Image (cartoon, helix red, strand yellow):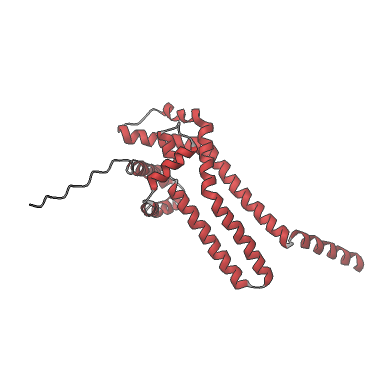
Amino acid sequence: LKSFRGCLVARISRCFSMIFSPFKFILMALLFVLLVAATGIVTEMLKAPFEVARYRYYLYLRKNGTRTSASSIFESFDFFVQFAIVTGTREIVIQWLPIVIAVATVILTFVFLLSGVIWLAVLILMFGMIAAAVISIYRRLQLWPMAWVQADHPQLSAQQVIARCKEMTAGHIGDLLIFELSYLGWWLLNNITGGIVGLLYVTPYYNMTKALVFECPRSPRPPPAAAPRQY
């Protein structure tokens, strides 16, 4: 009986050592990161026509001052494939560099943990994740008008939409970050109330404000005033 128990324990420990070996752990971590990223991209691609349809409504309301018919919202589904491709391209552009940084951070952290340099592993993990988060936030702010550009110009390709977004947000990243942070209290209140405040007030208010922000960078700037003549 003791020999059977000893054999069973040895087999279990062998299985655990195979599962949690360093290379397999790194491989599992990489697969997990890629799976989460792929799931996010596919989800955003499927949501794209609904997102563009919602923004078409707010742009129409902003430009004409009246509500459009409900049936016109579904015109976005005529460009379902194009909107999905453009949105997928956006997510890839946003996520590829943070994913590379996150993967490199996980590998380096695990290597230094195995080497026994725990403080360096913790430092690399902290700075790597912060760098990935900062780059992801910057890219999202840089490309935030993509769905609005698609709603206004559905015929544009992914490259044209991305180029227009970068042109619109150039020099305004800090302002956009402050704008998003100004709604932090509203979103916390929305979560506390189970989404009721967002449904009744915050979400329409936020989307209408973003429609105004979308129109603002495209408005022509007044020419500089001429300097007075010196006599």
Q: Is residue 156 above or below residue 203?
A: above
Q: Position of residue 137 (x, y in %)?
A: 47, 53
Image position of 109 (left or right of 231): right
The one of 185 and 126 positioned closer to us in this rendering: 126
Q: Is residue 128 above or below residue 84?
A: below
Residue 3 in sight from this viewpoint: yes
Please tell me whether residue 191 is drawn above or below residue 43 in the rendered image. below
- Taking the spot 66% from the left edge, 52% from the top edge, the residue there is 31
- Tell whether 45 sits left or right of 2: left
**For residue 20, what is the image quadrant?**
bottom right
Image label count: 0
Is residue 145 something that shows in the picture? no
Query: Which residue is outermost to the front?
Result: 231
In percent of width and height, residue 138 lies at: 45, 53
Quadrant where the N terminus sits is bottom right
Q: Find residue 177 and report its image quarter.
A: bottom left
Where in the figure is residue 142, as x and y percent of width and height? 43, 48
- Residue at x 52%, y 46% (from the top left corner): 93
The single residue placed furthest to the left in the displayed view is 231
Q: Residue 64 appears in which quarter of the rendering?
A: top left
* Residue 48: image location, x then y, percent: 50, 38
